[in-house]
Amino acid sequence: MTYGVVPEGFVRKPLEQILAEVQASLITEFGPDVIQTPQSPLGQLNGLFANLTAQLWEVAQDVYQSYDPDQAEGTRLDVLAKMRLLARAAGESDEEFRRAITNAGRARNDIQDLARAIVAVPGVTYVRVYLNESNEIDENGLPPGSVAVAVLGGDDEAIATEMRRYIVPGITTVGNVYVSTEIDGFCRSFALLRPILIPVSIDVTVRMRKDALGCPPPSTTAIRDGLVLELTSGIRRLLNGDDVDTYRVRSIIESAYPNVEVVSVIAQRIEDLDTAQQQVTDQERAVIAFVEMATVSIDDVTVTQVL
């Protein structure tokens, strides 16, 4: 049997097993005729050593369990509570404090908890939670007291099931896909916001020079690749409803390459390139609605150097 930290938790080695291993080791060293009866001097030493070792196993188990709020006690429980910015009230028992730390019996309705739960749904690649707590329709078109969960990937029903755990009855959900869930005979419907992916082309002209140390500027290919990487997976990645405009492109390129100046940016929804809209669209900005999400491919981005 395996002892210590295992996938199921921590398994402590029992005293009987420790004593048997000590006795087996002495037989290996001194032969089968070694006297280890409980009354013998060697047997007494075996018992003392096994008892001390068993105590070490108990300490190891206590240390392992002390990182679990459901098992920690006393001071260790106070330390774990600090991670949630909680402090023990005067006279509060470990059991009461433990329930406060773990939210036992309480609904967890924080936005980050909802987002974290949906991220864990298999296949989900993008999650953004929007909340309108005002008394007016917000800039995204969300009505007062509503929640919109924008998701790419994952199964609709699995996502709706997680939403049911965190969104209390009476809160309006906003989206373009509707899913019904049933638990214990009670049905609730949720709206998911499945962003419509809009391919966008970007044409950038740049002016480049050597930096203060005389080092040459990056290539236009490096600039293009860095821009696409940041727009698709960096800290300034495009979210649903984000326009692709000159400011976003310039901030990415010029912050990454101080010796590169962005002269102009032309961003355009690819679906508009072959239509009459091309003549009236503000070419410095590809306008993306809240229910849409811009996608950028290396093949649709060009970077040109000018003098």
Image (tube, rainbow, N blue to C red):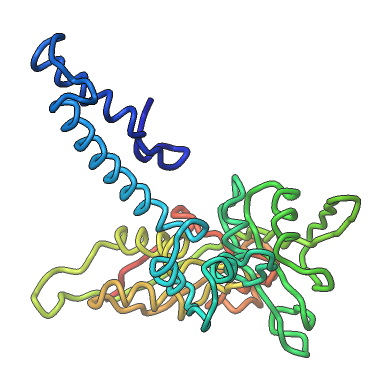
Q: Quadrant of residue 33?
A: top left
Compared across the picture, whether 233 is left or right of 276 comes to: left
Q: Quick one: which residue is furthest to the bottom in this view? A: 135
The location of residue 219, given as percent across then percent down, is 25, 62
The location of residue 70, given as percent across then percent down, is 52, 57
- Work out whether 221 lies above or below 61: below
- Work out whether 40 lies above or below 159: above
Q: Quick one: which residue is furthest to the top in this view? A: 32
Residue occupying the point 19% across, 31% down: 44
Compared across the picture, whether 259 is left or right of 134 comes to: left
Front in this rendered view, residue 131 or 305: 131
Residue occupying the point 34% across, 46% down: 58
Compared across the picture, whether 226 is left or right of 160 comes to: left
The location of residue 129, given as percent across then percent down, is 63, 69
The location of residue 13, given as percent across then percent down, is 35, 35
Compared across the picture, whether 8 is left or right of 23 comes to: right
Front in this rendered view, residue 302 or 241: 241
Q: Quadrant of the C terminus?
A: bottom left
